[in-house]
Image (cartoon, rainbow, N blue to C red):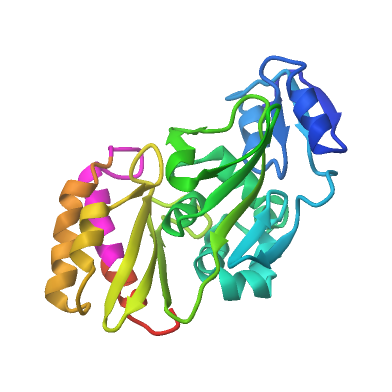
Amino acid sequence: MKPAAFAYVKARSLDEAIELLGTADGARVLAGGQSLIATLNMRLSSPSLLVDINHIAGLDRIVRRNGHIEIGALARHAEAERSADVAQAAPLIARALPHIGHVAIRNRGTLGGSIAFADPAAELPACLLALDGKIDIAGPNGGRTVKADAFFKGLFETELGPRDVLTAIRVPAADPRTRVGFAELTRRHGDYAMVGLAACARADGAALADLRLAYFGVGATALRARRAEAALSGGALDAPRIDAAVAALADDLDPPDDIHSTGAVKKHLAGVLLRRVAAQLAEPGA
């Protein structure tokens, strides 16, 4: 299929992009285009104007400062995958990146685009939620920062307004006590996950503290399994504690049926992934 007709403009600055987004109803930002172009071709979206932000300087940065790692919206998945700073300061993101699509997609797709698109089965929104990350946004009223907990509002719905541009994501830099875990189940490598889990915690002796379990593929957004977090925290990661955390998922998750599996199967798979991720969290240097 071919997309419906649309206008195209290449923005040279954030201010210009924000201004252009206000000139047409239904204008959309074009970054990597790995999701947007597909929806255009299938006529699932039909914007009147595409505002290309690929030539705005500085939006592809990857820097460490003030105890955080900051990844610009235009950083390609492949760039982040190769980045030593991402590997050291954001090991959870580093673990997740190879699971995103295929090499061709990662060469063009951007971290900012994945976060802004907010596909409920995508890896990066869940990672950002697990890491207690923040999203920097530029808009007609200036810049603002939104925590991941508040950014994802519903199915493909975020805090971004019609004239907002996501400029960067920021997560706390890992330290020697940081523990992370990541696992997903797909029908084929490169597919969106049937169920996935991103986790981050702080080692407290043999126990975990500040544990965040973020599931994806089980609802309209990535979501935290708070009862399972509580059950898994506060003591050694032995079999009874892990069993209790898996049992707690019954109250945390209510996945809908879809074309891949029933909700009951997804809930079972969520428990399988929790056991795998718990083993990763128990490993020093994980």
Quadrant (top left, top right, bottom left, bottom right) of the C terminus: bottom left
Residue 74 versus residue 181 in the image, above or below:
above
Res. 37 image quadrant: top right
Q: Does the magenta stretch include residue 260?
A: yes
Quadrant containing the N terminus is: top right
Q: In this view, does 211 lie to the left or right of 237?
A: right
Q: Which residue is drawn at 65% across and 72% down?
A: 85
Q: Is residue 156 left or right of residue 37?
A: left
Q: Nearer the viewer, residue 168 or 119?
A: 168
Q: Is residue 202 left or right of residue 42?
A: left
In front: 202, or 54? 202
Is 194 in front, or is 119?
119
- Residue 195 makes an appearance in the image: no
Answer above or below: position of 175 versus 7: below
Residue segment shown in magenta? 256-274
Image coords of residue 102 (percent x, y)? 61, 58
Residue 255 at what x, y percent from top left?
A: 27, 42
The overriding secondary structure of the stretch rendered in magenta is helix
| Residue 159 in the figure: left or right of residue 181 | right
Q: Is residue 91 visible?
A: yes
Q: Position of residue 125 (x, y in %)?
A: 49, 49
The magenta stretch spans residue 83: no
Q: Position of residue 236 (x, y in %)?
A: 21, 80
Residue at image point 63% right, 44% down = 113
Q: Quadrant of residue 268?
A: bottom left
